Image (cartoon, rainbow, N blue to C red):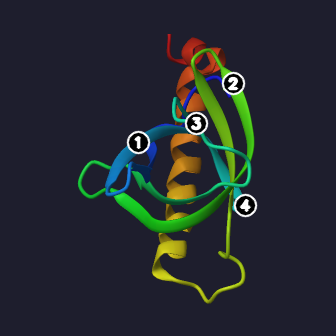
Amino acid sequence: MNEPLPDLRARFLVKRGLFRKERIEAALYDLDEYGCVFKTDRVFEPGDTLTLDLVMAMPFDDIQASGLNGLVTERRKHCSNFFYSVDFIGLDSRPKAPDSEKLDRIREVLSKKQSLRSRRGSPSSLRQTA
């Protein structure tokens, strides 16, 4: 978990007082069919539930999976921030919603971006072009 995933952010609202909510945006470090890992300076406890929007930046239209429910399962401190492991709740038990299809699309595009990035960054591909 050295670098955040390319072009992928989590957004969620956090209560601040009785009537105010604050929008938080956090970099994602891992994403699979079961959940994600993000890093933020906000404090959550294992057992807390969040409603996340995952947003993948694209050249024309961003891909956004909105309203994903997640359960904080783990917290690890890293300097002044925390890494949080979040399990998605209810994605498998409900019928396929448009947002779960968008989440599948985000995973697909992410896989392609990581593959391209690893090919560009590998020393063997640099030697072949020189």
- Please tell me whether mark 1 sits on a helix, a strand or a loop: strand
Give the spatial CA distance, label 4 vs label 3: 22 Å
Which numbered disc flags the more N-terminal residue, 4 or 2?
4
Q: Position of residue 98 (x, y in %)?
A: 46, 80
Q: Residue at x 63, y 14 (%)?
A: 123
- Label 3 CA crowd tier, 10 Å (few <14, some 14–19, many 20+): few
Q: Amino acid at mark 1?
A: Glu
Give the spatial CA distance, label 4 vs label 2: 22 Å
Within the image, what quadrant is residue 93 found in?
A: bottom right
Q: Amino acid at mark 3?
A: Val
Which numbered disc flags the more N-terminal residue, 2 or 1?
1
Reading the image, the residue beneath label 1 is 25
Query: In the image, which is nearer the foreground, mark 4 or mark 2?
Result: 2
With respect to residue 58, does 34 lie above or below?
Answer: below
Give the spatial CA distance, label 2 vs label 3: 10 Å
Which numbered disc flags the more N-terminal residue, 1 or 4?
1
- Please tell me whether mark 3 sits on a helix, a strand or a loop: loop
- Label 1 CA crowd tier, 10 Å (few <14, some 14–19, many 20+): some
Query: In the image, which is nearer the foreground, mark 4 or mark 3?
Result: 3
Q: Position of residue 76 (x, y in %)?
A: 73, 30
Reading the image, the residue beneath label 4 is 34
- Label 2 CA crowd tier, 10 Å (few <14, some 14–19, many 20+): few
Query: In the image, which is nearer the foreground, mark 1 or mark 4?
Result: 1
Q: Which mark is residue 43?
A: 3
**Horizontal side, residue 15 vs residue 94: left or right:** left
Q: Position of residue 64 (x, y in %)?
A: 39, 61
Q: Of residues 74 and 2, which is closer to you in this image?
A: 74
With respect to residue 124, does 85 lie above or below?
Answer: below
Q: Is the residue under label 3 in contact with that under label 4 (CB below 8 Å)?
A: no
- Please tell me whether mark 2 sits on a helix, a strand or a loop: strand
Reading the image, the residue beneath label 2 is 77
